């Protein structure tokens, strides 16, 4: 079987959740496809000639064909769509985007979350319209829809009327190379690189409204006030997202010296992530909505206690005993949870152990094997 895969998102330099998903899934899918006798076509939109020349080396194998067809705008629906119609694979798979309009061959799509439905104000109007259309389009034309969690599966059924048997949950894996760091010299070096001094609490992710950072900042402000300045820092690690002005306003409204306790280092290099997470006293992740919640799982794997929301996919992913759960819309609950994590070492130890055990459920090898089986099923027309 010839499997065509939209790999355009896998090359993003600063990868967030969906781009990292595409990259790691494709990397683990290729050897399994070779063993099963399948041919793979990877479709890219790379204008840079140096990067384009490196694609075959990045994705090796006699069974892998690189199809690089760059176009500045409307690549998916114009250039990729044309390529698929001219030389159709036996099955087309998109791990992080949308099936081209006008392409009617057998296909499988991935829907990562429906956060735009729950928090429409967190997206520009044009993007919101496109997300609504693309989700409905993927659900309508694909033979199967892969989702990251049962929570997203239920959203698709309830909000778009997609039959349950058409939606399959495949849990993503842990970032390869992510591991607990105990070497104090390494921990200090990474903290120093991002100008972090002393103990710290960590948030990691895109700085955008649905991450609930305005409430987290307010809870930290309250904590700072009640501890006479002898406090942990709060590190908000990640790049600014759309409508992040509310987060900036929450930061700038803090009175001196409270705002000195908050550090915003920007996007974290992948090589530093393990140490940054491992060095934190706790991960604070009170997100209002997540289709999966990679940061919480990554913290568990590193043995860092997690505070997170009792909603969307987060309890499903973190496990019943793997995190300290709070109502993300309750400022008092977030503040109380922060205090518990800093004042109760036994709680931190328990969450560290149970979180690490929970993280063992997730593997890219397992995810890739499940996805390949679904692609084979879809190619045979089986629901």
Image (cartoon, grey):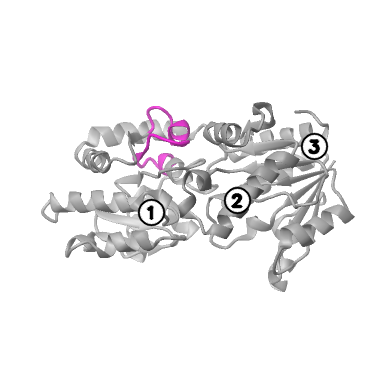
Kindly identify which numbered label has been placed on residue 276. 1
- Decide if residue 376 is on the left or right side of residue 334: right
Residue for badge 3: 36
Q: Position of residue 15 (x, y in %)?
A: 55, 57
Q: Position of residue 71 (x, y in %)?
A: 74, 68
Q: Earlier in the sequence, mark 1 or mark 2?
A: 2
Classify residue 60 by image quadrant: bottom right
Q: Is residue 8 visible?
A: yes
Tell me which residue sits at (75%, 56%) in the image: 43
Identify which residue, 212 or 132, lies in the foreground: 132
Q: Secondary structure at mark 2?
A: helix
Front disc: 2 or 3: 2
Magenta residues span 299-322
Q: Residues within 10 Å of mark 2 (few under 14, many from 20)?
A: some
Q: Is residue 349 above or below residue 125?
A: above
Residue for badge 2: 131
Classify residue 305 by image quadrant: top left
Q: Secondary structure at mark 3?
A: loop
């Amino acid at each position: 079987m010839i499997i065509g895969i939209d790999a355009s998102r896998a090359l993003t330099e600063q990868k967030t959740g969906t781009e990292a998903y595409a990259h790691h899934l494709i990397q683990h899918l290729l050897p399994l496809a070779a063993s099963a006798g399948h041919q793979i076509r990877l479709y890219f939109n790379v204008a840079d000639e140096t990067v384009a020349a490196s694609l075959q080396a990045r994705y090796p194998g006699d069974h892998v064909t690189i199809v690089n067809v760059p176009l500045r705008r409307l690549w998916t629906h114009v250039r990729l769509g044309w390529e698929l119609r001219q030389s159709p694979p036996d099955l087309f798979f998109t791990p992080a985007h949308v099936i081209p309009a006008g392409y009617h061959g057998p296909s499988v799509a991935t829907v990562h979350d429906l956060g735009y439905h729950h928090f429409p104000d967190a997206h520009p109007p044009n993007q919101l319209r496109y997300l609504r259309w693309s989700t409905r389009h993927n659900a309508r034309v694909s033979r199967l829809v892969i989702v990251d969690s049962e929570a997203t599966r239920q959203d698709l059924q309830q909000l778009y009327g997609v039959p349950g048997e058409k939606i399959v949950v495949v849990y993503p894996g842990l970032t390869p190379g992510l591991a607990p760091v105990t070497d104090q010299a390494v921990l200090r070096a990474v903290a120093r690189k991002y100008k972090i001094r002393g103990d710290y609490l960590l948030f990691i992710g895109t700085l955008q409204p649905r991450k609930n950072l305005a409430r987290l900042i307010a809870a930290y402000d309250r904590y700072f006030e009640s501890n006479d300045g002898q406090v942990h820092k709060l590190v908000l690690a990640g790049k600014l997202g759309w409508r992040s002005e509310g987060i900036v306003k929450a930061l700038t409204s803090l009175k001196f010296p409270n705002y000195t306790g908050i550090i915003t280092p920007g996007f974290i290099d992948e090589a530093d992530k393990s140490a940054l997470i491992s060095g934190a006293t706790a991960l604070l992740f009170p997100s209002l909505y997540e289709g999966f919640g990679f940061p919480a799982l990554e913290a568990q794997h590193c043995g860092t206690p997690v505070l997170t929301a009792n909603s969307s996919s987060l309890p499903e992913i973190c496990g019943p005993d793997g995190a300290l759960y709070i109502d993300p819309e309750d400022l008092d609950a977030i503040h109380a949870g922060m205090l518990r994590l800093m004042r109760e070492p036994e709680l931190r130890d328990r969450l560290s152990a149970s979180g690490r055990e929970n993280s063992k459920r997730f593997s890219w090898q397992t995810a890739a094997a499940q996805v390949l089986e679904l692609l084979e099923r879809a190619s045979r027309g089986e629901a």
